[in-house]
């Protein structure tokens, strides 16, 4: 019962599905960025900046940031519960990972939306 409180979803199946969905979002974003870079070999800062000024790209990038947070949290939670047995150390590790992911997501939102 305690482990259900510390994991991201309500069940292992839910976590598994969220990790797969986030992986698809990350894969699509990666393919798009690589394709964009290949189709614009002489890319300028102005073109790159114009891409990220569009609302759809900001939303896509936000989805990517949230997907990184979900994907990494589920993965790190799984690894830490499997390999870090002392409860205090595991809690500290998970709290530190959660804090860092929160900071990175907020920072990414500030960069994307210019807040």
Image: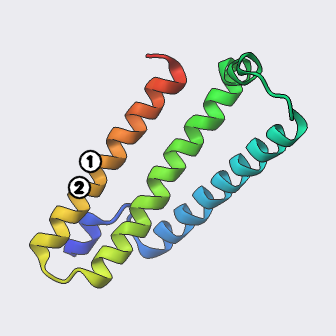
Is 79 placed above or below 53 here? below
> Which residue is tagged 2?
96
Q: At numbered mark 2, what does the secondary structure look like: helix, strand or loop?
A: helix
- Spatial CA distance of label 1 from label 2 is 5 Å
Is 68 placed above or below 47 here? below
Image quadrant occupied by the C terminus? top left
Q: At numbered mark 1, what does the secondary structure look like: helix, strand or loop?
A: helix
Contact (Cβ within 8 Å) of mark 1 with mark 2: yes
Is 100 placed above or below 115 here? below
Residue 61, percent from left and from top: 61, 36
Is residue 112 toward the left or the right of residue 95 in the image?
Answer: right
Residue 8, percent from left and from top: 37, 61
Residue in view at x 65 percent, y 36 percent: 60
Pick the residue in front: 50 or 73. Answer: 50
- What mark, if any, has residue 99 been given in the picture? 1
Is residue 41 toward the left or the right of residue 79 in the image?
Answer: right
Toward the right, the furthest residue is 39
Tally of numbered tags: 2
User: How many residues crowd around disc 1 within 10 Å: few (fewer than 14), some, or many (20 or more)?
Assistant: few
Toward the front, the furthest residue is 42
Residue 90, percent from left and from top: 19, 71
Residue in view at x 29 percent, y 56 percent: 97
Is residue 95 toward the left or the right of residue 77 in the image?
Answer: left
Toward the left, the furthest residue is 88
């Amino acid at each position: 019962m305690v482990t259900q409180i510390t994991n991201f979803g309500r069940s292992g199946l839910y976590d598994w599905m969220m990790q797969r969905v986030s992986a698809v979002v990350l894969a699509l974003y990666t393919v798009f960025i690589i394709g964009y870079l290949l189709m614009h070999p002489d890319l300028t800062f102005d073109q790159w900046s114009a891409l990220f000024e569009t609302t759809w790209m900001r939303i896509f990038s936000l989805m990517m940031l949230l997907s990184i947070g979900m994907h990494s949290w589920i993965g790190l939670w799984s690894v830490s519960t499997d390999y870090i047995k002392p409860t205090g150390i595991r809690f500290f590790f998970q709290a530190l990972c959660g804090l860092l992911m929160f900071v990175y997501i907020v920072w990414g939102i500030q960069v994307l939306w210019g807040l």
